[in-house]
Image (cartoon, rainbow, N blue to C red):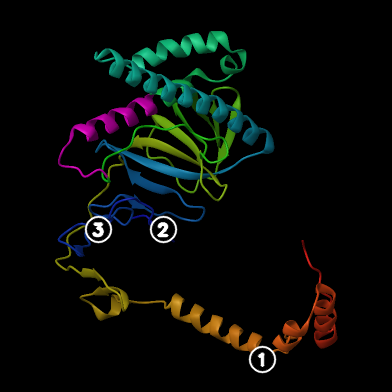
Amino acid sequence: MQRVDRVRPRCTSRCVRAGGTAARIGAAPDTITGGCVVGARRYVALVSLTGDDGKVRYTYRLRLSAAAQRLLLAEWDRCRWVWNQCVEASNAAYRQSVETGEKVECGPALLDKRLTGWRAEHEWLAAGSSVAAQQTIRDFGRARAKALKDRKDKTLSPRQRRGMPKFKSKHRAAPSLNYTLRGFILHGPQVRLAGGIVVRPVWSRELPGAPSSVRIYRDPLGRWWCSFVVPRPQTESLPTTGRSIGIDWGVADVAITTSDAHDLPHPQHGRRAAARLARYQRMMAATDRPVISIAMSECTRAKGVEQIIAAFTQQTGYGLQVLH
């Protein structure tokens, strides 16, 4: 059994789905039955499930040098340009199909052929990695196929349907690069990517197997991460003890168990923050602040802007500047 110092759940679906809100804890400590993500130790090595039941993702924090970050951003600019070209090709195919009444294909195979022409036409695009550009086309193809499938599904509401891929802005889109086996190798503590990019993950835990792909991305806080797709590790079942415990996620308490010794009380962070805010507001209210006001009688008797400024200055001692 491995020790988990800190668990940081980070998934898009519910982590506990066994029997409603209650779950029976009998799995290994690094997994949650029916869940998606497991936290890890310091610097976080997240383990999440992929679409394939035999694959999981191990995510590690990246410490980048200035040169590596510059190269990654340059590679992302090329991939973003390829994505936008795919979006334009998809829109053109849709307009042509509407005008002619015939279906126009715009799949990954056709876009791969266009990528060859784009790289031959633009030297700056050919200077980058072809693997990252091809994976960008694969991601675009999956996003477009999912949007077209949702359009045909009448059981989904318009809000539940996946929208068509859109253009990615340079300043708003988060960098994300995907590499397959042809685009990266593990060299000791380093990960060498195609294009001469070398990054160093914070190895908070060992990979259970050889990775089949890696995704390099940056979160909204500016932190870089690498996510490896590896085979699911084989877990060893613990001996049966005949005892069980039930967990229910509550409001007054974080977790209510069938054993009083294992209940998790609510930390009450919001209540303490509200009390601290009220204390600071009382401290501000007790301070002496000059009240900037002008009597209405002075305003009504004033015949011009100069008289209003003079009356304001005489009453408060502050200068007044009039903006035209």
- Dot 3, how many residues are within 10 Å of its Cα: few (below 14), some (14-19), or many (20+)? some
- Helix, strand or loop status at disc 3: loop
Front disc: 3 or 1: 1
Residue 182 visible in this rendered orientation of the protein: no
Which quadrant does the C terminus fall into? bottom right
Is 142 inside the magenta-drawn segment? yes
Q: Secondary structure at mark 1?
A: helix
Picture disc at residue 8: 2
Give me the disc on residue 286: 1
Is 139 on the left or on the right of 260, as rendered? right
- Span of residues in magenta: 138-158
Spatial CA distance of label 3 from label 1 is: 49 Å
Q: Is residue 183 above or below residue 164?
A: above
Compared with 27, 133 (above or below) is: above
Query: Which of the labelled discs sits on residue 271, or is there none?
Result: none
Residue type at the position of mark 1: Ala
Note whether 6 is above or below 44 in the view shown.
Answer: below
Judged by depth in the image, the label closer to the viewer, 1 or 2, is 1
Which element is circle 2 on?
loop
**Distance in Å between CA atoms under marks 3 and 2:** 14 Å
Residue 251 x, y percent position in the rendering? 30, 75
Q: Give the quarter of the image for residue 163.
A: top left
Looking at the image, which residue is at 35% across and 14% down?
109
Percent x, y of residue 150 = 23, 35
Mark 2 residue type: Arg
